[in-house]
């Protein structure tokens, strides 16, 4: 029997874009809990942000942060510690952490080099999280100051608030990737619902999903796992394409990600957690 694993984006998918509430998705979350289906947050958010969200969701499954830059598995979730993981203790909780991405400091240094080399061409057209600070993050996201502070506790990436036009954005991304290539550490920009995210070129939600699925296959309780991926933004495309079943959640603020795959695709009629609740329930009923 095939056992589902649900990898889900948070902002704009499981969580409402404006209120960050998951209430509308509660009925299907309850069904997933009763079926013992792992619900694996796969998000641009940080480890610090995920801990209170997991508590609110009553979620004890592994999770993926910073657009795939790091994976966290609760210690004891599997009988054996997965290969290449290290112990991480956060807020008294123990996790097996996997990451091969450069640290946030590396990406901040790379951004400073773009400003140095291109001057006013880019330096006035973006603000990164480091420069925004807690109040600036709160103003842009609508998050309370306490949660904005958690969003700024990044380990492996740097979000960017882009102020220029689309043509300038393409030049900016090309400049970052070019400088990264010269340093033999690939830089990559993924676009989320609100921000650009500067991360390792080898780090993406799809790759992290596949690695964590391998851990389930090696250490889990079942022989066969099927991946369901749910997301609403461009930065979800890698996992939506790589999953066995793709669930696209419609957004009220941007167009839906366009997928190359043609089979096992579902798209919600409603937005955000209402759409998430609708389409995941349909997948469970149809596929399982």
Image (spheres, helix red, strand yellow):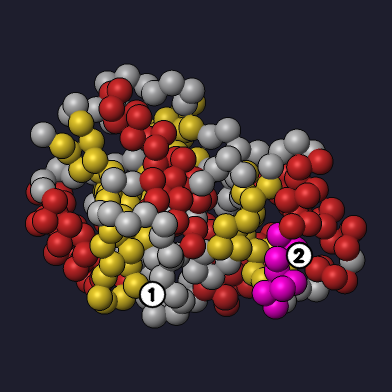
How many C-alpha atoms fall within 10 Å of the one at disc 1: few (<14), some, or many (≥20)? many
Q: Position of residue 124 (x, y in %)?
A: 80, 73
112 part of magenta stretch: no
The tally of labels here is: 2
**Segment tinted magenta in the rendering:** 165-173
Locate residue 265 relative to residue 125 in the image: left or right: left
Q: Report the front residue among 56 and 71.
A: 71
Q: Is residue 49 visible?
A: no
- Tell me the residue that label 2 is attached to: 171
x 85%, y 70%: residue: 121
168 part of magenta stretch: yes
Give the image quarter of residue 281.
bottom left
Per the image, label 1 sits on a secondary structure element best described as loop
Q: How far apart are the alpha carbons under marks 1 and 2? A: 27 Å
- The disc at residue 251 is 1
Q: Report the front residue among 99 and 174.
A: 174
Mark closer to the observer (1, 2)? 2
Whether the residues at callouts 1 and 2 have beta carbons within 8 Å, the answer is: no
């Amino acid at each position: 029997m095939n056992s589902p694993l649900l990898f889900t984006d948070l902002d704009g998918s499981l969580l409402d874009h404006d209120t960050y509430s998951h209430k509308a998705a509660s009925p299907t979350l309850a069904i997933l809990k009763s079926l013992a289906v792992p619900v694996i947050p796969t998000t641009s958010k940080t480890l610090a942000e995920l801990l209170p969200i997991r508590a609110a969701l009553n979620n004890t499954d592994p999770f993926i942060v910073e657009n795939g830059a790091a994976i966290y598995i609760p210690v004891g979730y599997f009988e054996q510690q997965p290969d290449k993981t290290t112990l991480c203790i956060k807020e008294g909780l123990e996790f097996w952490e996997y990451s091969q991405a450069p640290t946030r400091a590396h990406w901040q240094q790379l951004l400073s080099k773009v400003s140095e080399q291109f001057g006013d061409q880019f330096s006035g057209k973006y603000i990164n999280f480091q420069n925004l600070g807690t109040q600036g993050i709160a103003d842009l996201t609508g998050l309370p100051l306490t949660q904005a502070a958690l969003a700024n506790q990044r380990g492996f990436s740097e979000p960017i608030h882009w102020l220029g036009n689309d043509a300038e954005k393409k030049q900016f991304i090309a400049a970052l990737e070019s400088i990264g290539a010269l340093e033999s550490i690939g830089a990559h920009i993924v676009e989320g619902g609100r921000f650009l995210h500067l991360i390792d070129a080898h780090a993406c939600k799809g790759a992290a999903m596949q690695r964590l699925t391998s851990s389930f296959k090696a250490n889990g309780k079942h022989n066969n796992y099927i991946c369901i991926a749910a997301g609403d933004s461009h930065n979800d495309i890698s996992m939506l394409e790589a999953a066995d079943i793709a669930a696209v959640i419609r957004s009220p603020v941007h167009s839906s990600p366009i997928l190359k795959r043609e089979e096992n695709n579902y798209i919600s009629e409603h937005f955000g957690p209402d759409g998430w609740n609708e389409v995941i329930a349909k997948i469970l009923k149809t596929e399982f």
